[in-house]
Image: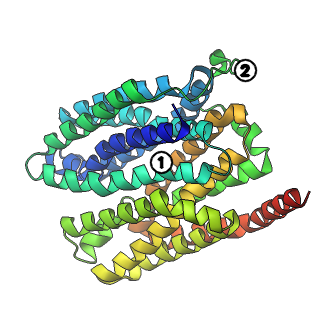
Amino acid sequence: MNKKASLSIIFFTVFIDLLGFGILIPILPLFASQKLNISDFEIGIIIASFSFIQFLFNPVLGKLSDKIGRRPIIVSTLLLTAFSYILFTFAHNFWMLLISRLLAGFGGSNIGVAQAYIADVTSKEERAKGMGLIGAAFGLGFLFGPMIGGIISQYNYEYAGYGSAGFSLLAFLFSLFFLPESKKKNSLVDVHKIKIFDIQFAIETFKIPITGMLIFMFFLIVFSMANIYGTFPIIGSKYYGFSNKDITYMYVIMGLIGAIIQGGLMKYLTENLKDKNLVIFGMIMLSLGLGFIPYGYNFYGVMISISFLSVGSGILQPIIISMISKYSPEHNQGSTLGLSQSLSALGRVLGPLWGGFSYDYIGFRSPFLTGSLISFFALVISFKMLNNLEKKKDQNVKN
């Protein structure tokens, strides 16, 4: 099977799975609060648990995929994800809901493997466009998933769990029958040495200055955005008077912009602009978007701020992941991309915790303003590295 067909299949596999994930995004906190009478603190634990498991297991699955191939990992985790949604449907207390999210987090640890799959079937020049497909799948999943979830939840929250499970099961069947293996088995990887978050491998990776800095940048970006995961719906409801439908529209806007940029514009942008310029522009847009949200004052003002944020994140996520892949050893693509996804998951754990704490104890604007400052800080500390990368690339072209 040719590379183009393989990319199309991995895109549709991830997209179908993320539809199921997107269905639960706006529903989970309401289901936990209204149906299970779970406290806000317990809801925070449940939301953070998903990303914490990804922090632990993204590198494990990435390294394992370097050894046995990408396809077995992707297929098996999709089936596990479908089971986690079934468990969500029957959850009637905190512990059942927590277990369902832990299993979903383990299943969702396949994103680094999917990115490694794309790295296998693309050249370094095509990689940003290829990684954009994963971003587009996320964007479309967040576009259509919450819309479907909002419709289903009007009838019964449990139906949303069945819908999510159905999409993940469909993705499992699609990958089982159509997804080819992209990688030969790697005899260099000792499966017995695979650990839950291999600290030694992380240290060795961060000793590579370019790769380490890029992974750190990615962590800061995700942390900045994760500050508002739990607080954006609250500020929308309490301070702007948004309805659930209005907040859903905001998520739809984010998903739509992300899908347009990562699914279509990334090819044009990477062909006509340097990586450095894309990163700088993306950082500026992200920082402005986060900083303006608490000053939007009405639906249209917040919508403009969200649009800035979405443009920034839509550019940054594929370009930085593609740069991490470019400057990583070919035989360790799964391991390195798994590590980057692991630290981004850590950002999704720490971000909401800081966002909730700062919201309660500092002020409702603080999660957004700190996110804006941190994303700007990421730009400042990376500026020298980006210039050095550009100089080296120009020298290589001349030589």
Element carrying mark 2: loop
- The residue tagged 1 is 134
Query: For the point 40% across and 72% down, which residue is it?
Result: 306
Above or below 199: residue 389: below
Res 259 → quadrant: bottom left
Front position in the image: 10 or 368:
10
Circle 2: is it few (<14), some (14-19), or many (20+) Cα within 10 Å? few
Element carrying mark 1: helix
Give how far across and how far down residue 305 sits, in percent: 41, 77
Above or below 67: residue 287: below
- The residue tagged 2 is 188
User: Please, which residue is most extreme toward the right here?
Assistant: 399
Task: Tell whether 399 sits left or right of 171.
Answer: right
Give the CA distance from mark 1 to mark 2: 27 Å
Count of labels shown?
A: 2
Above or below 184: residue 267: below
Res 123 → quadrant: top right
Give how far across and how far down residue 249 sits, in percent: 26, 67
